[in-house]
Image (tube, helix red, strand yellow):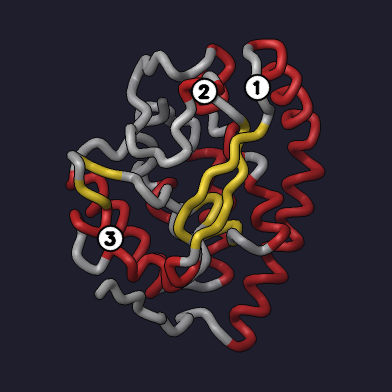
């Protein structure tokens, strides 16, 4: 019989209050600062291909609960894969022209400021993976022992793994293991200053688009 472990929050009491306040303040700042970029992106998506501007995807949140994450649509509507069972690869024909650019620059993730504001995501934390994400026909939790420990905290818009190069296509088991290792390090060493450092470094580190397709 499948069982779901109920984790204790490693970030609790006043720490959780402080982190939530951090998310609300900086999410509002992010929305205000990037609103022009989001409006231009929405127009470009509409002009480039038929379909909705936003793409909703079910992913694992805190304590393995299923959450809905917002993204700008980067694929042709009839070729979209909400389950993310098939990883996006380099020159993937499912990705639109505008989609290639916004995925490379991570602009497609900007709507997740609203996820953070509403509380399903945190600004900083382990990136949420799609519930059916696989590597070589194995679910991520089948590849990495203790994988679900990364769900002890809310997932984030950005994270320690992402600014250290573990972003984009997870096409090997080693990449999944390394991302999980960095996620667990973040959880074990969390502080508001650590969050602020990750948030500050994110736009700088995202200039490296090597693994973003």
95 up-or-down from 85: above or below: above
In the rendered image, which residue does mark 1 sit on? 51
Tag 2's secondary structure? loop
Instruction: Write the residue at 38% across / 74% down.
Output: 188
Q: Which mark is residue 171?
A: none
Q: Are marks 3 and 2 in contact (CB under 8 Å)?
A: no
- Residue 71 image offset from top left, x and y in percent: 60, 38
In the rendered image, which residue does mark 3 sit on? 181
- Residue 52 image offset from top left, x and y in percent: 67, 27
Q: Going by the image, does 165 lie left or right of 201?
A: left
Mark 3 or mark 2, whichever is nearer to me: 2
Mark 2 or mark 1, whichever is nearer to me: 1
Q: CA distance from mark 3 to mark 2?
A: 30 Å
- Residue 175 image offset from top left, x and y in percent: 24, 45
Q: Which image quarter is the N terminus in?
A: bottom left
Q: Residue furthest front?
A: 1
Tag 3's secondary structure? helix
Q: Earlier in the sequence, mark 1 or mark 3?
A: 1
In the rendered image, which residue does mark 2 sit on? 75
Q: CA distance from mark 2 to mark 1?
A: 10 Å
Q: Earlier in the sequence, mark 2 or mark 1?
A: 1
Query: Residue 55 sits in which quadrant?
Result: top right
- Counting labels gives 3
Q: Which image quarter is the C terminus in?
A: top left
């Amino acid at each position: 019989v499948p069982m779901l472990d109920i984790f204790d929050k490693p970030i609790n009491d006043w720490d959780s209050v402080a982190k939530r306040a951090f998310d609300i303040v900086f999410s509002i700042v992010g929305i205000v600062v990037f609103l022009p970029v989001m409006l231009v992106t929405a127009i470009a998506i509409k002009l480039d291909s038929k379909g909705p501007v936003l793409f909703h995807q079910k992913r694992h949140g805190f304590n393995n609960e299923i959450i809905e994450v917002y993204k700008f649509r980067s694929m042709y509507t009839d070729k979209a894969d909400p389950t993310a069972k098939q990883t996006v690869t380099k020159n993937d024909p499912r990705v639109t022209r505008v989609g290639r650019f916004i995925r490379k620059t991570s602009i497609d993730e900007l709507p997740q400021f609203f996820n953070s504001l509403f509380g399903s995501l945190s600004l900083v934390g382990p990136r949420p993976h799609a519930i059916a994400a696989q590597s070589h026909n194995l679910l991520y939790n089948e590849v990495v022992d203790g994988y679900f420990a990364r769900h002890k905290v809310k997932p984030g818009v950005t994270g320690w793994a992402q600014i250290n190069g573990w972003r984009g296509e997870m096409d090997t088991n080693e990449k999944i293991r390394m991302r999980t290792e960095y996620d667990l390090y973040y959880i074990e060493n969390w502080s508001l200053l650590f969050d602020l450092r990750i948030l500050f470094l994110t736009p700088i580190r995202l200039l490296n688009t090597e693994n973003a397709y």
